[in-house]
């Protein structure tokens, strides 16, 4: 019971904090920030506690059959006219994604302490953004899911346009409008699912037990898939992400690349494939061709870019491609790999953007050609960036390696020639990743230090906390992958079971 | 014996601890303490290894897994684990790695004393030792790849240790990316083989029989192969990993460039341990590779080509470390073609002997560089009197690598020669003999130019040989003298598991005499060129007035330039630039076109918003009539 309450509080607490801060005058910046930080820390603590609880609960009773076993469930009637419920619960996948979000939100707040004017609004928006992302991962009702899903794009726009840099208006609009396009596709299919199921329900677990008509699935699945793929920046809908990320303030980049992009892949796993397995089996062998761009080609594009945030954005596109490959292959191992990569890349890219943001706030340039020798001046950030780079190129010991090799082994198990070919290309393209990462790190950190950077200082205690926390997450997942992987299995089993029908 | 088995994991943990303590606590604040801690911990690992290896002598030559724990499960029957395999091969490598690492640590205490970031150096050195040990004791392909990559990254960190130096940075990048390219094939091979076999375990993979796989098929994207062929492709891919790591032709270019790192790094990584990882990989999976004759053939040819090619280049180099680097390439070629010629024991024996004398040669080079502050032969000469201990040790090492009895290189090279002839590769044998003579020539060219003749640099105060730097060299010299006599132990224990090698039993008693005579002749020739009263040293060191052929060789056959053209111009300049253009222009325009359509559609709809009531009514009626015609409305 307590756990259920705590679980609900994960998304309610940020909202409450925001309300609490409304009466505080904006001059008391420090107080506001501390309240928000405390609440972020509290949510993180709750998420950690619940994850541990849930892990042991799921060990105690393994999942059987195609019904997801949810814990910490709250189900209340809500919009009774359309039979939508307030229905939230947790299983391995959603719990871990919530934990990831909590980490990224907390670290995102920590790096935003120097955001400057309007920090009251900025922190409020981070909290609301956090709420919406938590909500997406927690809800098992399509209407509720969609409402949370939509909230996030709006917050993003406000934050990018308000606190961004460079072409912030353009980047913000591009991001929000493209995501809105995806949402439209998603909403249309949700209605279709509701109607076609014939059970007058929005409940994902109930809908999963209904076999939707195959003719419906044939066209609805690709639309839903592409709708979600927009936020996962699958080719050809990847174009919003480089401009969006580069215009966004650090915390938003971290949240967008770290968590929000995974909402798309999460939706595909949890809704598209779970509810429409026949459509998935039919359409994914064609849709998988799109991942070639992400996995193989985006890395090459990253090599050519000189702007740190563009490089990181294309690196994200490329890593996200592996998630899509893992999902599309539809084998037990590849789906687990995809889920692992969702987590791993969340921590990884948050670390990347955090480090990039810290460097940018000191050098006021993101062009790597204008930097050099920073390792001497800011060793802590420099080392963190290098570690992020190593984790990004799949160095064993960090989570990326575990996720990638699981995806490779899993997608190779799909016997169709397409998957074999793409897997082979994906494995071989790990070299390209190494090229752009080393090139960037070397250019930025090594060599001679330009005179104008002689006065910059290394990370402060808050920033150090951010970097260390994220690195520990990467290491933890990379060195002890077995528990996480088993935990994920418990929630992927029902999806796989449905695929067999 | 049983006691130490229970603690064997400390062999890996101690260096890891050294890394952690230095990276997190001591670091650059207490560089001296960092060095001592690292050295002591690595020394501890060496002592434990010694107890483990010598304690198990003669008791149980079988492979045993000392400990193993599951790491990552893929399915019910298919999982990756981490463990410690203990068999004669891994015992030999454990011994070599820990002993050499300890000696290099001791040497570095002095060598890196004046470097402000020597704490970082020792942290990386310990990390490397840990990674290499993990690789050596791997029980399965997954673990091997795991540590293989760690070895790669620690090598990257050490080559680029002086990160303010652009040449070091670019050398480290080149080394990492080139070996990474090879590793991507390795990974692919692991995926392929483990898919077919359903396991990563060496024991399983080494006991396969192709007959079980010839009747089932596997789709590989472009075509369908029988699983036996699939295994052959997988074996090839796995070998490519070793090809890159061991810097075989034409993926050799990173190794000479890696000499930009501090000399102790060259000594441990780029001569004695990491670069033999490829040899170790093939040896570890030898029964598996034996199933695929074509791949053995490839290993044979690559090995001999690398051996000869590198030896030729070494004759023209003037940087002492580069000479040694090419000699390493050449010696690794020996190990490889020995494996290709089924000379498993000979190859492993050569790994063992080579490790000591090559490590020593680099330490000698380091001591010399410490003395003259230059890598170039043109600043050396006449160092014999200033560095007597180093001089004697260097002589032992040079004699050993040239294959002069009774030093260790003689014994292992004889075994290799014998193996090639016994298994019917006379052409390879002939080239090997030629390479051996070249080796003697270029090693003594270096030796004479460094230690004999007149000093070409005048020092104000020559550095005295310090204990910390000379002691490891002397110890290695002792190893170089005695390690050749372990021949019988190798012949008895270091045989490939699970397979029997063909035994022709043919004897060629003339080989040692011929090889030694050739080497001696080459040494005398080098003497005539470089120390005899008539030697024209200035001309020998002049790089400009040379024949065209000499210049091509001295420029290493322009391989660096070819690589540069392919990677920079073609891959990054061509393909990647095209892709960026495609993304920016083509996709960008499509997005713009889409927004344009939306805007125009919006304009069109707004045009209909006239506010004129008759217009609305008229449209409504027209619409209803239209639907009526379609028969869809019950009007």
Image (cartoon, grey):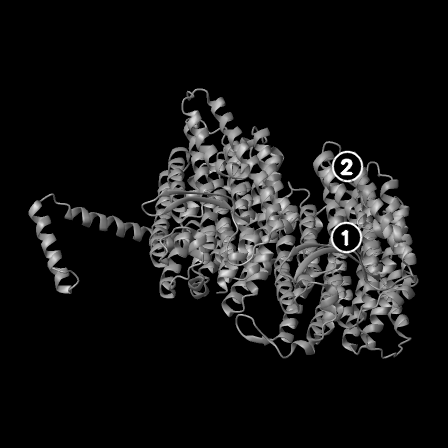
Q: CA distance from mark 1 to mark 2?
A: 21 Å
For residue B156, which numbered disc appears in the image?
Answer: none
Q: Which residue corresponds to mark 2?
A: B34
| Crowd class of label 1 (few under 14; some 14 to 19; many from 20; radius 10 Å) | many
Relative image position of residue B525 (x, y in whole percent): 84, 63
Q: Residue at x 8, y 45 (%)?
A: B613
**Is B133 displayed left or right of B393 in the figure?**
left
Q: Which residue corresponds to mark 1?
A: B133
Relative depth, front residue between B123 and B204: B204
Q: Residue at x 69, y 48 (%)?
A: B154
Q: Of helix, strand and loop, which one carries label 2? A: helix
Q: Quadrant of the C terminus of chain B?
A: bottom left
Relative image position of residue B86 (x, y in whole percent): 81, 58
Relative depth, front residue between B565 and A120: A120
Lower sequence index among marks 1 and 2: 2
| Residue B158 seen from this side | yes
| Crowd class of label 2 (few under 14; some 14 to 19; many from 20; radius 10 Å) | many
């Amino acid at each position: 019971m307590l756990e259920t309450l705590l679980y609900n509080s994960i998304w309610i607490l940020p909202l409450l904090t925001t309300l609490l801060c409304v009466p505080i005058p904006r001059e008391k910046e420090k107080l506001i920030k501390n309240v928000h930080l405390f609440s972020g820390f509290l949510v993180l603590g709750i998420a950690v506690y619940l994850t541990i609880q849930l892990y042991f609960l799921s060990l105690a009773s393994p999942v059987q059959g195609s019904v997801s076993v949810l814990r910490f469930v709250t189900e209340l009637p809500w919009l009774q006219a359309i039979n939508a419920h307030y229905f939230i619960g947790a299983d391995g996948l959603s719990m871990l994604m919530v934990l990831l979000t909590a980490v990224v939100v907390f670290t995102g707040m920590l790096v935003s302490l120097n955001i400057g004017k309007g920090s009251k609004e900025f922190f409020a928006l981070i909290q609301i953004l956090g709420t919406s992302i938590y909500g997406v991962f927690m809800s098992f009702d399509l209407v509720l899911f969609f409402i949370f899903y939509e909230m996030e794009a709006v917050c993003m726009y406000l934050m990018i346009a308000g606190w961004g840099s460079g072409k912030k208006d353009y980047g913000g609009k591009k991001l929000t409008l493209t995501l809105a396009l995806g949402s439209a596709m998603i909403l249309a299919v949700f209605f279709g699912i509701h109607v076609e199921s014939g059970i007058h329900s929005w409940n994902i677990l109930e809908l999963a037990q209904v076999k939707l008509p195959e003719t419906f699935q044939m066209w609805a699945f690709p639309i839903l898939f592409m709708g979600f793929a927009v936020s996962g920046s699958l080719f050809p809908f990847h174009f919003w992400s480089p401009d969006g990320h580069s215009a966004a303030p650090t915390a938003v980049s971290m949240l967008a690349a770290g968590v929000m992009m995974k909402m798309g892949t999460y939706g595909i796993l949890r809704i598209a494939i779970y509810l429409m397995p026949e459509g998935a089996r039919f359409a994914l062998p064609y849709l998988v061709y799109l991942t070639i761009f992400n996995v193989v080609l985006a890395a090459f594009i990253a090599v050519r870019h000189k702007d740190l945030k563009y490089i990181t954005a294309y690196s994200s596109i490329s890593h996200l491609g592996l998630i899509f490959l893992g999902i599309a292959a539809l084998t037990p191992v590849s789906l687990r790999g995809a889920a692992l990569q969702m987590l791993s890349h969340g921590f990884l890219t948050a670390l990347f953007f955090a480090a990039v943001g810290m460097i940018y706030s000191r050098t006021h340039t993101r062009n790597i050609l204008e930097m050099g020798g920073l390792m001497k001046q800011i060793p802590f950030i420099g080392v963190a960036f290098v570690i992020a780079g190593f984790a990004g190129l799949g160095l064993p010991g960090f989570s990326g390696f575990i996720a990638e090799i699981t995806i490779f082994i899993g997608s190779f198990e799909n016997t169709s020639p397409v998957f074999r070919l793409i897997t082979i290309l994906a494995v071989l393209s790990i070299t390209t990743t190494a090229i752009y990462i080393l090139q960037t790190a070397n250019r930025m950190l090594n060599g001679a230090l330009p005179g104008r950077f002689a006065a910059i200082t290394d990370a402060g205690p808050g920033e150090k906390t951010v970097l260390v926390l994220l690195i520990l997450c990467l290491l933890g997942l990379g060195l002890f992958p077995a528990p996480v992987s088993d935990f994920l299995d418990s929630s992927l089993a029902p999806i796989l079971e449905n695929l067999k029908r | 014996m049983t006691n130490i088995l229970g603690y064997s994991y400390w062999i890996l943990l101690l260096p890891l601890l050294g890394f952690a303590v230095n990276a997190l606590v001591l670091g650059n604040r207490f560089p001296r303490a960092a060095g001592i801690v690292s050295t002591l911990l690595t020394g501890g690992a060496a002592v434990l290894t010694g107890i483990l290896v010598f304690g198990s002598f003669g008791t149980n030559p079988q492979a045993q897994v000392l400990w193993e724990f599951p790491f990552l499960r893929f399915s019910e029957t298919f999982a990756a684990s981490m463990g410690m395999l203990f068999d004669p091969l891994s015992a030999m490598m454990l011994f070599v790695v820990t002993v050499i690492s300890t000696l290099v640590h001791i040497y570095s205490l002095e060598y890196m004393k004046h470097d402000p970031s020597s704490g970082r150096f020792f942290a990386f050195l310990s990390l490397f030792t840990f990674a290499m040990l993990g690789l050596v004791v791997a029980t399965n392909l997954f673990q091997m790849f795991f540590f293989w990559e760690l070895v790669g990254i620690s090598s990257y960190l050490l080559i680029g240790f002086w990160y303010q130096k652009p040449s070091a940075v670019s050398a480290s990048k080149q080394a990492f990316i080139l070996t990474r390219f090879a590793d991507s094939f390795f990974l692919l091979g692991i995926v392929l083989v483990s898919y077919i076999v359903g396991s990563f375990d060496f024991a399983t993979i080494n006991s396969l029989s192709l007959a079980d796989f010839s009747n089932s098929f596997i789709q590989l994207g472009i075509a369908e192969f029988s699983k036996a062929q699939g295994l052959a492709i997988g074996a090839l891919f796995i070998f490519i990993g070793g090809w890159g790591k061991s810097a075989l032709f034409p993926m050799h270019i990173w190794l000479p460039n890696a000499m930009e790192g501090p000399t102790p790094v060259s000594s441990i990584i780029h001569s004695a341990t990491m670069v033999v990882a490829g040899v170790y990989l093939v040896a570890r999976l030898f029964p598996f590779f034996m199933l695929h004759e074509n791949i053995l053939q490839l290993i044979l040819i690559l090995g001999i080509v690398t051996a000869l090619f590198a030896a030729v280049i070494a004759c023209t180099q003037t940087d002492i470390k580069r000479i040694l680097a090419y000699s390493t390439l050449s010696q690794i070629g020996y190990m490889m073609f020995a494996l290709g010629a089924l000379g498993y024991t000979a190859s492993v024996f050569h790994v063992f002997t080579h490790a000591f004398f090559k490590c020593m040669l680099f330490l000698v080079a380091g001591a010399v560089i410490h003395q003259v502050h230059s890598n170039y032969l043109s600043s050396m000469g006449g160092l014999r009197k200033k560095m007597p201990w180093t001089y004697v040790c260097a002589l032992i090492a040079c004699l050993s690598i040239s294959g002069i009895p009774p030093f260790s290189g003689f014994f292992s090279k004889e075994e290799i020669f014998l193996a090639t002839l016994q298994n019917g590769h006379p052409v390879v044998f002939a080239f090997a003999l030629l390479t051996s003579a070249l080796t003697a020539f270029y090693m003594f060219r270096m030796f004479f130019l460094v230690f004999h003749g007149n000093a070409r640099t005048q020092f104000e105060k020559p550095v005295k040989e310090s204990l910390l730097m000379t002691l490891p060299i002397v110890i290695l010299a002792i190893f170089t003298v005695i390690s050749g006599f372990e021949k019988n132990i190798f012949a008895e224990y270091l045989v490939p598991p699970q397979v029997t090698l063909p035994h022709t039993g043919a004897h060629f008693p003339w080989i040692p005499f011929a090889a030694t005579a050739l080497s001696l002749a080459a040494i005398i020739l080098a003497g005539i060129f470089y120390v005899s009263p008539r030697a024209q040293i200035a001309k020998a060191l002049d790089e400009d007035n040379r024949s065209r052929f000499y210049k091509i060789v001295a420029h290493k056959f322009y391989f660096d330039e070819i690589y540069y053209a392919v990677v920079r111009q073609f891959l990054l300049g061509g393909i990647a630039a095209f892709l960026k253009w495609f993304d920016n222009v083509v996709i960008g325009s499509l997005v713009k076109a889409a927004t344009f359509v939306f805007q125009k559609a919006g304009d069109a709809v707004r045009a209909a918003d006239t506010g004129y009531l008759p217009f609305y009514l008229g449209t409504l009626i027209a619409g209803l009539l239209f639907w009526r015609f379609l028969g869809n409305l019950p009007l």
